[in-house]
Every structure is written in structure tokens, then in C-alpha cells.
Amino acid sequence: MTVLALALFTQLAVVTPRPVQPVLAFPERSLDDTTAYRGYQTRFFRDAARNTIQVYLDERSARVVHLMADADNASIGFTARDDSGRTAALAWASPGASVSASGRTRRFEHRLTANTNVLHLGAFLLGSMRVERDFQYFQKGKEAFASGPYAITEVDRLITTIAALPIATQPTHLRLLNAASVNELRSRMYPRIALTNTGAFWVASIQQVTLDARDTLTLELRAATRDVNASVAGDSLTLGAKRGESVAFGVRISTTAKPLTPLTRAEIFTPEFLAFLEATRARGARVAATDTAAIRARRMERQVRGVELLVSREKLMAGLSTYATYFGRDMLMTALMMQPIWKHATLEAVIAVALRKLGPNGDISHEEALGDQATRESAGEYADLIAASVAQRQNANQRGADSLFTRAEGVLRTFRNVRENYHMIDDEYQFAIVVARWITDPTVSAESKRAFLLDSTDGGGTRVARIMSELTLLTRLTAPYAANPIAANLIAFAPREPSGFATASWRDSGAGYAAGKYAMDINCIWVPHALEATGQIIGAIKTLLPRSALALESVTPLNRYIADAQSLSSAITTWRGATRHFTVTQTAAQVQAAVNARLAAMPAIERSYWQGRSETAAASSTELRFLAVALDAAGTPIRVANTDPATQLFLGDGEGRTTASTPAERAKVLDAVRLFVRPYPAGLFVDRIGPVVANDAYTTPGVWDAFVKDPYHGPRVVWGREVNLFLLGVANRIAVEQRQSQPDSAYITELRDALMKIRTAVEQSGFHTELWAYTFENGTLGAQRYGSGADVQLWSTTDLAVQFVLARAAERGR
């Protein structure tokens, strides 16, 4: 047994519950606008294995949800209503909780109070957090408890499919799921509820076994018999106060899922950043709690704790509560932005995780499906394969039918294995940049680089071989445009039935790219940088390893680039010219006409607000240049102004460098910067809110309607990721210009003013989270928490890098 395994075993051998306090809580007075959370409150704890437990109370959906951010990403949730059927007002009954463990089972307990004399609890859902997310998205929590338990469609299809198998085959498939009969399998679909009177307590036990019976989730609700009457009806529990107007009850959750191995801040961050954090804390401690320095210190500490909640040896989670899984894009983007404050080992861990999840064709995994989500996806695949097998047999294709049937059995044999999703495309290009920045870092020794590249302990060959596999895919995908730079050869989204294209980059909502086929961020920003990164990786490997490390089995564009650096340079130059397809120029008259048309289509309150601001007229009176968010299938720009140029500001003019020193290069930078600070609805800037992620004023009413229906990446929403990219990018541009022999002072002043304008607006919004939105109440504009936004989100914690970089810049400017 390894030292790590022994430590974990000892940790989990504890049986006696021990008290724990929250690591974080939202909203937090003076850090958050409590009104913006609108009945939502959450706390984060560490369980007995130091894995993250999040509990949130949401009056909007009447849900109480417990997220276990471990290797299964499981959750336990229920709905709370009063006797009239309305949302029951719940509150924490104590400031902390308790944790314990025995064997494989970890437990977490806390207490709640309901401000009602009759409390109905139901809609119990124990399983994947992804299932809980869908449950809430489709507003299932609003249905009557008597409507029955929530059925997972894919699992229901699997059981129905097995029930229809030939009698000779059925037992084999049941055994693969550890079931003796279809009825036994069906009994595992839903949680079982049992009520017991122990004398002192009513104990309601709600238990959910996994479909293959290998793991168990348990929820126990406890109430003192002297204070409460309890009863069960169907799948719901009723607690009635014997006296008074409130009901107090305890909540215990238990899981047998595999824990993760969390990392500490000392393992994640550089000593320089931790010293900066401590200095910030010390300054905050010397002033009043409401002082800006004190608030900044508290916020930074909260963000550092957030990183610790998300980062483990096994993976970096995208966010909590909704995304307690690996997201390739989120991890890679965060790594790029956090490079100034993360240790080299953290960057290496990011690369190693991505390589461990690499697809057979060199694809970077976008997202993992864990636990019951893996079960859900496997169940759907199994049912589809069996249905296809039956169809082939009916068409007298016995060989095809047998092949599909064998594949279906294979799905059952790996039923709960982690499943990887490879449908996103931006992470293919981001990965190369992360590798290039690590492999060219002079502070990492050549010996360390060689050891990392030649490591094969994860399986699947050496890391350098897997890196070459990914670069082979990248260069193959980009070769057509490099050879013939027409719009039809740009990187495209795949078709999506029944119409349109699948949004496979970061604006991954239905309306995110305005139904475009060719995304600007992929084609104008990520591809050119990734190709330049490819050249840097090739050059570094040539100096670190034998030539055999670059040997490829087949003729590919990567072979050609390895042999001929000039051909790669030519491809990079060609791809840097792709911006010509996306460039939009609007004259002052066109800007005015577009803004007027968009205002006319807005609701009256919103239209009145924007028309009443002097900034609206001023912003509409000059021409505007921007890069369209995407091209349509014909290669025509879809004129949605957007924040994606912040990525270019951040990455620089060439991979790993910024050389803005000519008037033409400065003009490109200022086009992007001015769009950010130009007031909405002509530009992106909204006072006291920040830069909205898109402005659809210059496109068609059809796009307007799409963003109204699907606002996730629309004109009402600000994304923290884009804010931080902008601030880091502008700070870098200022630093580069200051190093010029003859710096342009007017250019520097304009960049500084823009940086301060965006930073001030975001501070005034009260948000430093994944995303937030503006809303109107009584004609007044204000910020609010976006409904599906994460409380702790990996790439939002990059605000830490912003604070560090800006503080260092201020020190250099003194």
C-alpha cells in the first residue's frame, strides 16, 4: 500500500462524526449584492476525505441540493413545500455541519429549519448532478409529488430493451448489471423511502443504488418525535410541528463513491503569488471591514479557496455546483490565464490530464461523464445498438446484427466507466498553446521537460507520442485553408439536425454563434496561435529528445512542417489573414440606423432607458469596426459584435509575444478596445455592469429573437472569463508599449482608461463570478445572478491573476 493510499485509508477509517465549518458561503455580506441572489444561498464544506460538499437552498425552485464533488459528481436533492403547496422557506439551523467515514462510506450531516408548521418533502433525486441539472431545467420540481418519481429516459429504455431480449440471452445481460431479473433491475430506477420511529426520532431513509448495484447514495431526514409528527405518502414525506410555526430537521447524506485527492494552495500557486496574497490580507486587516482593501483581500481569499475546492490530483473541475466535472476548454483556458501565478507542476498536471483523456484520433476531451451520468449515456447507447441489431436482423443482415449485438454487450461490460465527450473543437487548439508555453519556459529545466515528455505511466504510450497525435490532428484540420484560403475551407461546425450547426466552441448555447457555421474565435484567433505553438513544440522537442520522437508513421501535414519550417510559417501567415472574412465596418449612418432599429424592437421600459442616456446618442454617431462572431454557410459575416477579441488581446500578436509597435498594429488593438468601452447599444459597455458578451444590433431580427429566447451568450449577459481576458490583455499591451524605445503616450493613456473603465464597472456590478446579467426593475438597471451560473467556477478564479498582474504593473509604474 502506498503512503498516499495508507493516508487515505486512515482518513476514511474515522467513524465518530467531527464538526466542520463552511469553507465558503454565498452570498456573503459586503462581497455580494445579497438581493442579486434572490432567495438562493449556498455553503461549501470538506467531507472526511477532504472532498467538496456543496449544499444550496433555492427558494425559486424549492430545491435543497447536496453536491458531492468526488469521482462520481453525484448529488442528492429534494423539494420542500408548505401545506399550501408553495415553496417552504428554509434556513440553516446551525452554522456548521459534521462529517464521518467508515470503510467506503462517507457521511455528511447538517440541520435545517422550515418556517412553516407543516412541511412536505418530495421529488427525491439521488444520482448524477447532471440529472439534477436537467430535472431543474425542465422544471420538474414544480410538479405535484403524486405525479411519481423522475424517470431517466435512457435507463427506462435500457430496461425495456432487456425485457424484450430472447430468453436465452437476457440472463447474460442481466448478470453484467448484477441483476437476477428485470424486476430487480427496474427496482433500482428510483429511490426507496422508509420511515422509522426510533423512539426519540423519526428517521426517513431514502436510498438509491446504482443501476449495477455497485454503489449506493443515501439520504436520511431526522426529526425529534417530541416536536414533530411524521408520515409517508407514496414518494413524499410530511413533517408536522406539534407546537409552534416551524419544523426543524436533520439531513444526513452518505455515499460510497471513490474520493478525489485535493491539492492545497501551496501545491498550486507560486510562492510569489502566495506572498502577494498574504500582503493583500495584511493590508486588508489594517483597515475597516468596509474599506476597498479589506474587501479585495476577502474576495481574493475566497477565490483561492475556490481553486482549492476545484483542483485535485486527478483533475481540475470546471465549476460548482453545475459543472463538478472535467471540462477541457475551461481547464486549458484557466491554465493560460493563471500562468503568472501557478506553479510549473500545476501546468504539467493540466497537460497530463488532457493527454490521459486524449481520444483515439488525438482529440482533446471536452467533458467527462461520471457515475450515473456515465450510466445514463451507456444505457442510451446500449438501447440504440440493440435496436439497430434488431433492424439488421429483420433485413436479413445476420453478420451486421451480430456485430451490433456484441458491441451492446461491450457497453454493459464497461457500463459505469468514465465516458469522454469530444464534440467541442476549440480545445484542440488551446491545448497546443498550453504545451508550447510550458515547453519553451526557460525556468523549467531540460531534465524536467524530458522526464515529463517520456513518462508513460498513464498508459497509451509516452506523453510526447500523445502530443504528436494531437498535433497531427490539429495540422490535418487546418491544412485545407492553408492550401487554399477560401471561406469554405475554414474550420466549420458540424451540421445539427434538423437545421443549423452545432455550436462547438465556447459560446456553446443554441444562439451563441447566431446560427453561424464558421466561428471567428476558432478561425481568427485560436488556429493561428495553435499553428505557431506547433512550431515551438517541434523546435523544443528537437533539442530535448532524439529525432525518433518526431517520427510519424504516415505522411501528414505535420510531417511536412517538421521537415520544412518554412511551410509551417507560410501556413501561419495564411491563417492570420482569415480576419478578412470576418471584418465588419459600419459607417456612422449605419451605426445610427442599426441602433434605432434595435431600440424600436426592445420592450418599452428597456427602450426608454437606453434612449434616455446621453451616451447612447454619442456612441451611435461614429463608425465602428469589429470582427463578426461567425460566418454563415455562404461565408457571409453574421454581424454580431462580441467580446472574443479579448482573447486576441490576451494571447498577443504572435504566440507568446506581443509586439504592438507600429501604427497599424496599434489601430487593431484600439478597434478591439474601443468596442469594449463603447456604450451599449452601439458597443458592448454597460455602466455598473461591464461589457456584455454580444451586441446583436447590427444583424437581423431573427438573431435578435434567438438571443431573447436563449440569452446565455446574449446582449444582457457579462462573462467573467471575457472580463479577465480583456484586463490581462490590455495590461500586457500597456507593458509592451512601455518597453518600446519611443512609447506612444496617447495610446498608453487610452488603454489605461479603458482598463479602468471596465474594472470599475465590474466592481460596481458586485459580481466576480462565471457570468451575470442586467435587468430592469421600475425602470432602473441593475445586476443579477444568472440562473445557471456556477458559484465557484474555474476560469472565473482567474481574477486572481488579474489582481496579481495589475498590482505588479502598478509597482513597476511607481
Image (cartoon, rainbow, N blue to C red):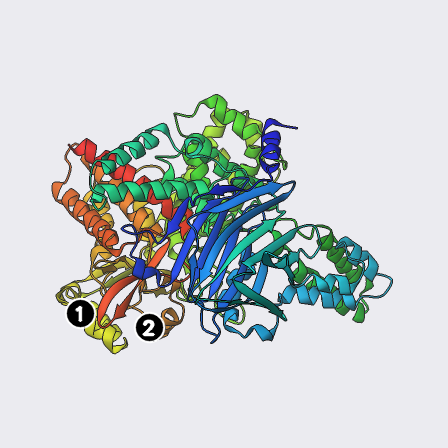
Q: Tell me if residue 16 comes above or below residue 512 in the rendering.
A: above
Residue 652 visible in image: no
> At x 51% / y 66%, what residue is drawn?
79
Foreground of the two, 617 or 370: 370
Q: Residue 727: tell me if it is visible.
A: yes
- Mark 1 belongs to which amino acid? Ala
Q: Are marks 2 and 1 in contact (CB under 8 Å)?
A: no
- The front one of 165 and 678 is 165
Q: Position of residue 240 (x, y in %)?
A: 52, 68
Q: Is residue 498 above or below residue 341?
A: below
Task: Give the Cα separation between the discs numbered 2 and 1.
Answer: 17 Å
Quadrant location of the C terminus in the rendered image: top left
Looking at the image, residue 609 lies above or below residue 463: below
Locate residue 102, reporting x and y percent: 63, 41
| Label 1: element kind | helix
Residue 601 vs residue 623: left or right? right
Q: Mark 2 highlights which residue?
A: 700
* Callout 2: SS: loop
Label total for image: 2
* Residue carrying label 1: 589
Name which of mark 2 and mark 1 comes first in the sequence. Answer: 1
Residue 558 x, y percent position in the rendering: 51, 40
**Mark 1 residue crowding within 10 angstroms, few (<14) / some (14–19) / many (20+):** few
Identity of the amino acid at label 2? Thr
Examine the image and state in which quarter residue 103 appears.
Answer: top right
Disc 2 vs disc 1: which is toward the camera?
Answer: 2
Label at residue 778: none
Q: Nearer the viewer, residue 547 or 684?
A: 684
Q: Position of residue 25 (x, y in %)?
A: 39, 50
Position of residue 259 in the picture relative to residue 567 (left or right): right
- Work out whether residue 584 or residue 175 is closer to the camera in this orientation and state it: 175
Structural crowding at the residue carrying mark 2, measured as other residues with C-alpha within 10 Å and reported as few (<14), some (14–19) or many (≥20): some
